[in-house]
Image: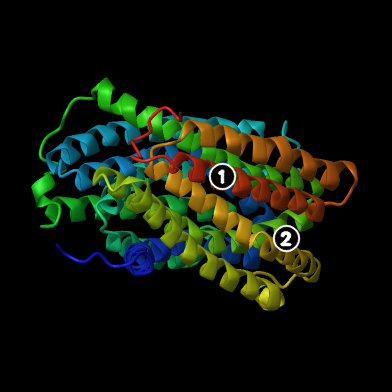
Amino acid sequence: MPVMPPPPARLRDEVRTTAVLAAPLVVGHVSTGMIGFIDAVLAGHHGTTTLASVSVGTALFWLAMMIPMGTLMALPPSVSQLDGAQRRDEIGPLFRQSLWLAAGLGAALFVFLSLVVLALEPMGIAPEIRPGAADFLRGIRWGVPALTLYYCMRYLSDGLHWTLPTMVLGFGGLLVLLPLGWVLTFGEFGLPELGAGGLGIASAIMLWMQALAFAAYLARSKRFAPLAPFARLDPPRWAPIGNLLATGLPIGVTVMMEGGLFIVTALLIGRLGDVPAAAHQIAINVAGLCFMVPFGLAEATTVRVGHAVGQGRGNRGVRRAAFAGGVLVLATQLTGGSILLFGHDHIVALYTRDAAVAALASSLLLYAAAFQFPDGVQVLSAGALRGLRDTRVPMLLAACAYWGIGMPLGAWLGLWLGWGPRGMWIGLIAGLVVAAILLGARFLRASRDEPVATVTDGA
């Protein structure tokens, strides 16, 4: 009989496999975060009011985008479980049904963004910010259907352990956004100066180019040829779409619970004027870039846990896949926190020359450094639970942490006691700490009993 390597050796192998799988995902996510970085830098050099407008517009865009993006996250664990169980002939039909779901979600989101501009005044957004935020939303909404389809194609590739396209297309999009955003924002080459609206239009164009490039790759790649992803146009079928929704909608709500905590914080700070809003946009953009690293690791962990379930490796295999991601997250979060702690002033200098904005943003980055570790733990735990397709109870736990504790505490400190953005950020830290504890405990409980079965109802 073959001699099995001892558990530490198997864990090292799992760490290595997860790192190789996650590296392109992390780079791809960082490139996605760099979209916000480029928008913020261009807007900040255009003016403080433009930066504040982009802050509010970006917040509303991603608040709406969280549910479709999270819902489509049901695809990677479903694909990885089918792959692990040697049922690859079922992947292509499932993907084609997910395209219908993505198209429907994109259409719904387009309508939402068309209407939400009417709510800027009732939300109490400062008058000087509202016109630019509305222009940004009217521009970027045209790219929403492309973004949902792009996520669908990306999650198919990720679920099959092939993450390189995410990295390549992510940085390819940046090569389009930077010059196009500059031209449309500042009105170069005889074009009108569109400010925040120009950034929205440039982002929409970039999103369509990414989606079309990914579709062309899937259609022509020999790697995906056996799956025949675009072999025919299947009519929508409720059973597979309903299964994706049953697993994915709680994921979408969970993602929105966390992302919404940050986004609603931005909207509340937008009531305080352009300097606090601009400073918060800088700090949250930097924190968001840092978050892309554990988020990519969590997605890789989802795939590895799902693959372990599909192969029937039991609770030891599942936990080994999750703990391998945990080792990597610990290292990356310590690194990110140290960079924010010691380099906050230099980072802020890249965004703005406004002294008041820079001083406030620099202080907020210290709070961002404080929540790096709990943020990494909670997103990794959520990713591991997605690999088990355990999504409903984590959704409730996230609601408790973010909206039962984080948001009330932040609003009380920031608005009621007058601590401003700093008080709101203390609420963010509290919500992430509670989420890390609850979701981590949930995964340990869900993976305790052997054999581990596919969980579809959160039980």
Q: Position of residue 441 (x, y in %)?
A: 56, 44
Q: Residue at x 70, y 63 (%)?
A: 370
- The secondary element bearing badge 1 is classed as helix
Image quadrant in which you'd find residue 44 = bottom right
Pick the front one: 431 or 110 = 431
Q: Position of residue 458 (x, y in %)?
A: 45, 30
Q: Which mark is residue 250?
A: none
Q: Which mark is residue 441?
A: 1
Q: Earlier in the sequence, mark 1 or mark 2?
A: 2
> Disc 1 to disc 2, how far (Cα)?
35 Å
Residue 53 in the figure: left or right of residue 182: right
How packed is label 1: few (under 14 Cα within 10 Å), some, or many (20 or more)? few
Q: Residue at x 42, y 62 (%)?
A: 324
Which amino acid lies under the numbered mark 2 shown in the image of this protein? Answer: Ala
Which amino acid lies under the numbered mark 1 shown in the image of this protein? Answer: Ala
Instruction: State the quadrant of the N terminus.
Output: bottom left
Question: Can residue 216 be spotted in the picture?
Answer: yes
Pick the front one: 73 or 204 = 73
Q: Are marks 1 and 2 in contact (CB under 8 Å)?
A: no
Residue 176 in the figure: left or right of residue 286: left
Image quadrant in which you'd find residue 227 = top left
Q: Position of residue 35 (x, y in %)?
A: 49, 60
Question: Can residue 172 be spotted in the picture?
Answer: no
Residue holding disc 2: 279
Q: Position of residue 163 (x, y in %)?
A: 30, 60
